[in-house]
Amino acid sequence: MASWGNALAVTGISPFAYVSNPARVLFGSGRAREVAPELERLGCRRAFVVCTADQKDLALRVASDCAAQAVFAEATMTTSGNTLGE
């Protein structure tokens, strides 16, 4: 590893750019019906709905509303580091 100013250069890694879209989060009761218009606003042509098993019915409704390609209903909630350490 070499340094250049405050930056470190790691040999064997090609340069790249990471571009992230700004996040837009819609909160509130009844907002699920806004998913299809939001996808259209973003110019998305295909959707993949991810949820926990408890939210499968809602996810299937959302998927139907926005003509999603698939639903994955086996996601799990984030586990804290404390839980992982036990």
Image (cartoon, rainbow, N blue to C red):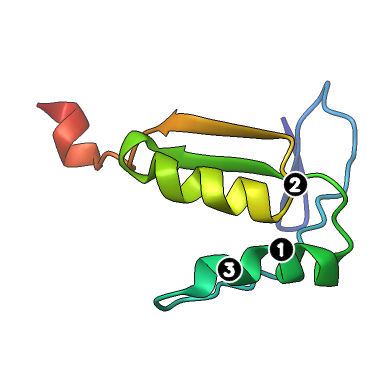
Q: Please tell me whether residue 28 is drawn above or below residue 73 in the rendered image.
A: below
Residues under labels 2 and 1: Cα distance?
Answer: 8 Å
Under mark 2, the amino acid is Ala
Position of 18 with respect to 38 (left or right) is right
Under mark 3, the amino acid is Arg
Q: Are marks 3 and 1 in contact (CB under 8 Å)?
A: yes
Query: Residue visible at 82% across and 44% down?
Result: 46
Front residue of 55/78: it is: 55
Q: Quadrant of residue 39?
A: bottom right
Could you say where residue 7 lies in the image, as x and y percent from the top left? 74, 52
Q: Are marks 2 and 1 in contact (CB under 8 Å)?
A: yes
Q: Which residue is identified by label 3?
A: 33
Residue ranking furthest to the bottom: 28
Position of 79 with respect to 25 (left or right) is left
Could you say where residue 50 lies in the image, as x and y percent from the top left? 53, 40
Front residue of 46/16: it is: 46
Q: Which residue is identified by label 1?
A: 36
Under mark 1, the amino acid is Ala
Q: Residues within 10 Å of mark 1 (few under 14, many from 20)?
A: some
Could you say where residue 66 lies in the image, as x and y percent from the top left? 72, 54
Q: How many marks?
A: 3
Query: Residue visible at 16% across and 39% down?
Result: 82
The quarter in which the C terminus is drawn is top left
Position of 27 with respect to 8 (left or right) is left
Q: Residues within 10 Å of mark 2 (few under 14, many from 20)?
A: some
Front residue of 10/77: it is: 77
Q: Which residue is identified by label 2?
A: 67
